[in-house]
Structure formats: C-alpha cells, structure tokens
C-alpha cells in the first residue's frame, strides 16, 4: 500500500475519535435531564452567574484542547516509517482521550463544589426512580422478526465460504475469509439480543412526573431501535463485501481495507446521529420538567461518567444521557470490563513498540546441511534443499498486494499476491538491492518464496550454497 494512503487511513482512524469525544463532551454544557457537565443542577438555578461562568470557561478550555490536539495529530504525515507512525498515532490517541476527559472532570468538580456550597441537592434515586408508576406503563419495543433478513443475508458468506473450503480445500485466504465472515455473522445474531436486553433497562426518570419519564424513555428506545437495525444491516452488507473481495485475489487486501473503513465510518455516523437526536430531545423535554422533587444521583457517578452503586442489582445501566449504556463498576463484571478496557488502551502504544521491533529487526538467512532458514525475530521459513526446483536473484520487486501478514516500509512478511506468480511467501526488506526468488515443490504442491537480507553478501552466499548443493 502506498505510504501516503496508509498515513491517511491511520490519520482518519485515530483522529476521528477526537471530534466525536469533543462533540459529546462539549455538548454536556447544554442542560439535559437536569444534568449540566455531568452534574445535577435544578432548572431554576442554571442561569445563575456562577453556573454560567463555569460553563463558559469549560467550553473555552475544551475548544483550546481540541485545537491543540488537532494540530498535533498532523505530525502523523511527517513520519517516514510505518511502525513509528503507528506508535505515534496510538500514543496521540490515548493522550487525546486523557486530555478531554481531564477538562471534563475538572469543570464537573467545579460545578459539584458550587452545588454543595449552594445546597442544590435533589432526591436520591436508589429506589424512587425504580418504584415510580412509570415502570408499569407499557412502551412497545421492536418485534424480533425485523432482524431475520439481515441475519439470513449475513449467513450467506459463511455458508458459501465453508462450501468453497469443503469443495476446493482450505488455503489461508479462504480460512481467514470464512473466519471474518463468521465473526460478523455472530455480531448480527447478537444485535437483536443486545437490543432486547437494553430495552429492558429501567426507565429514564428525572422527577415524579410519569409523563416526562415515559416521553424520555420513548425517545431513547426509538433511537436504540434504529441504531441496532442499522448495525445489523450494515454488518450484513459488510460481510457480503468481505467475501466478494476475498474472492478477488489480487485486490483482496485493498478491498478489505476499503470495505472495513466504509463500514466503520457509516456505523459511526449513524451511531452519532442517533446519539445527538436523543440528546437534543432530552434537552427539550427536560426544559418542561419543572418539579422541585427532582432526582439526584451524582454520588453514584464517579467523575460524572462511571456508574458505581453497590445497592443497584443491575450490571448494565443506561448512560446518563444519550442512547448508550454503561457497566456498574460496583459489580465484579464492571470491574473486569474496566480493567480489560484499561489494558487494551495501554496495549495500543505497546503494539507500536512491537511493530518497531518487527520493522527494524534485520532479516537473517541461515543455512544448514539440508535447508535454508529465514529468521526474523523467530524462524519464519525453512526451505528444504531437496524441494527446490528453481531459483533466481531479482533486483526489482514485481507489483504485489498483501494477503496475510505485514506490509511496512522496511518489511514485507507473510503471503502476498504477486503479479504473474500468484500467492507467494515473502520475508524481505523492500528497500534492499537483491532478492532471492525460490520455487519449491513437495507433496503439498508448488510454493514460491521471495526472501531478502540487509547484507548483499548474505544473498550471494545463499545463492552459492544452493548452487553447491545442486552439484
């Protein structure tokens, strides 16, 4: 893949998180469900000078953070090597998330301090919100039959791929293709289950007004319905695209990337659209909810975002605003998920370090009595001398696309579809001057290897070794 194309993809994939987080957190400066920057503030106190000053300063600092982080993100285009670029992108992503969260928590704490000083405390929601008459009101949810069509559509690539493996035998491309399609099919299967589970969560009560509670709940569930249906259909279409591109051998890698990026962007677009539709409705509905007996559960939300309530039997609860859900951190499942999430975030720059080791570790070609071994961190290939039917040295690599493996500025490793040769096993530095082209044949059929080393002398010695073995 062209280096500029990769940089653009990495920039989009990492940067798109920032405007989403920035937009959502800055949107918290608009009151919704008695909440303002994650703090329960009564409707009749929102226009006081102290509150307005904190909100104004919050928006200003959030804007400055967004601008600075955006400028720093463009540094991606100045890195030469793939692994270094990836490391910077992941480190920047974690820093960006940390910065906007810090700004949010800082001003949330300021509002909490002001609230405490003014004595703006509502009623606890431990039991009242659950026991309200609204819990008995029926709100229709979507019939599961609407998920049948995308489920069937997403199963087709799995069935066709499995059929290809049974009829023609399974190579690595077919196995990877079917595995991806099977995972996407599982995701479509889970969509109606998650939808049904989430819609069984308790309703959005902000005060004693049953009509307000039901209205807020309808808004949330209507948009959740749209989101899960869209997710099921998009995943089904993506599954078909994956299968089709995997069948087009030469363009499989590029096609898979294009399909994946399009799928992620469209899914994110619809999720954000539904999220802000709910937030806008919550804002309008909350403005009509003038009730002095409002609910206040700020003490259950760490930093305004993380739900911690040992008295709540639920593992999963609705997010405070929008259509999302979150885990109860007081429960073992919540603690496990939080720990796993933190580990995944920390693993991203670690993955960048590992990629740098991959890219900059020299490739070694070693010879034994009966074989040629290609070593890169570990032994990648062992080519028996008796299986070699032809070999050559080339100075210019033919056009190729990665099928499975690593494709970086200083490392091609794995299975590549090479123009004129089909699928070949590669382990080389594409910036090198010489490469050995080896064709072997054994009981499994013909295989083609293209290998290289940093030192041209190693290439020459390997060729001499093969020549001597043929005599």
Image (cartoon, grey):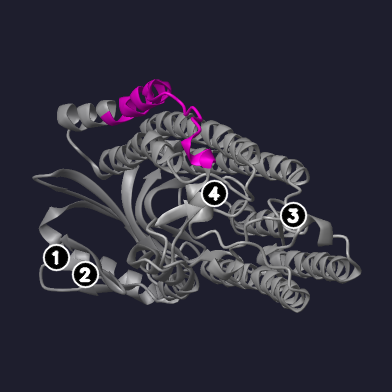
Q: Nearer the viewer, mark 3 or mark 1?
A: 3
Residue in the foreground of this view, choosing between 296 and 96: 296
User: Which residue was labeled with disc 3?
Assistant: 27
Q: Is residue 154 magenta?
A: yes
Q: Is residue 129 above or below residue 160?
A: below
Instruction: Give x and y (percent) for residue 276.
Output: 68, 44
Q: CA distance from mark 3 to mark 4?
A: 15 Å
Q: Is residue 29 above or below residue 446?
A: below
Residue in the foreground of this view, choosing between 261 and 208: 208
Contact flag, marks 3 and 1 (Cβ < 8 Å): no
Contact flag, marks 1 and 2 (Cβ < 8 Å): yes
User: Which residue was labeled with disc 2?
Assistant: 465
Mark 3 vs 4, N-terminal side: 3
**Residue in view at x 52 percent, y 54 percent:** 128
Mark 3 crowdedness (10 Å alpha carbons): few <14, some 14-19, many ≥20: some
- Mark 3, secondary structure of its residue: helix
Q: CA distance from mark 2 to mark 3?
A: 68 Å
**Residue in view at x 79 percent, y 55 percent:** 43
Instruction: Give x and y (percent) for residue 338.
Output: 43, 67
Residue in the foreground of this view, choosing between 240 and 366: 240
**Residue in view at x 60 percent, y 39 percent:** 210
User: Which residue was labeled with disc 1?
Assistant: 469
Mark 2 vs 3, N-terminal side: 3
Q: Main secondary structure of the magenta part?
A: helix
Quadrant of the drawing holding the C terminus: bottom left
Quadrant of residue 247 within the rendered picture: top left
The disc placed on residue 324 is 4
């Amino acid at each position: 893949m062209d280096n500029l194309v990769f940089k653009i993809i990495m920039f989009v994939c990492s940067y798109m998180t920032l405007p989403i987080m920035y937009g959502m957190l800055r949107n918290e400066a608009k009151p919704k469900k008695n909440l303002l920057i994650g703090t329960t503030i009564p409707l009749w106190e929102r226009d006081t000078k102290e509150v307005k000053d904190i909100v104004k300063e919050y928006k200003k600092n959030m804007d400055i953070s967004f601008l600075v982080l955006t400028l720093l993100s463009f540094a991606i285009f100045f890195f030469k090597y793939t692994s270094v670029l990836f490391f910077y992108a992941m480190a920047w992503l974690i820093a960006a998330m940390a910065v906007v969260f810090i700004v949010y928590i800082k001003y949330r704490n300021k509002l909490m301090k002001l609230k405490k000083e003014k004595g703006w405390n509502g009623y606890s929601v431990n039991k009242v919100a659950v026991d309200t008459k609204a819990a008995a009101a029926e709100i229709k949810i979507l019939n599961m039959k609407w998920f049948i069509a995308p489920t069937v559509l997403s199963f087709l690539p799995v069935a066709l791929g499995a059929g290809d493996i049974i009829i023609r035998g399974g190579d690595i491309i077919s196995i990877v293709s079917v595995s991806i399609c099977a995972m996407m099919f599982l995701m479509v299967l889970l969509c109606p289950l998650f939808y049904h589970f989430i819609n069984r969560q308790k309703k959005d009560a902000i005060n004693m007004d049953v009509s307000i509670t039901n209205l807020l709940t309808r808004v949330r569930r209507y948009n959740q319905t749209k989101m899960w249906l869209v997710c099921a259909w998009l995943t089904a279409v993506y599954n078909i695209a994956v299968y089709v591109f995997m069948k087009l051998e030469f363009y499989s890698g590029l096609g898979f990337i294009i399909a994946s990026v399009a799928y992620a962007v469209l899914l994110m677009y619809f999720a954000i659209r539904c999220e802000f539709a709910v937030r806008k409705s919550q804002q309008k509905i909350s403005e009509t909810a003038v009730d002095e007996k409002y609910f206040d559960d700020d003490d259950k939300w760490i930093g305004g975002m993380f739900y911690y309530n040992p008295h709540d039997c639920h593992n999963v609860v609705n997010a405070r605003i929008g259509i999302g859900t979150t885990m109860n951190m007081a429960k073992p499942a919540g603690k496990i998920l939080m720990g796993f999430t933190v580990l995944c975030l920390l693993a991203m720059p670690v993955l960048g370090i590992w990629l740098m080791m991959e890219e900059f570790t020299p490739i070694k070609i070693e010879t034994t009595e009966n074989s040629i071994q290609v070593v890169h961190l570990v032994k990648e290939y062992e080519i028996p001398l008796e299986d070699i039917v032809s070999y050559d040295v080339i100075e210019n690599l033919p056009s190729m696309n990665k099928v499975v493996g690593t494709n970086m500025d200083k490392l091609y490793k794995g299975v590549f579809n090479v123009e004129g040769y089909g699928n070949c096993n590669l382990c080389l530095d594409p910036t090198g001057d010489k490469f050995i082209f080896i064709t072997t044949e054994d009981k499994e059929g013909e295989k083609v290897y293209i290998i290289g080393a940093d030192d041209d002398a190693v290439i020459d010695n390997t060729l001499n070794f093969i020549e001597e073995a043929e005599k």
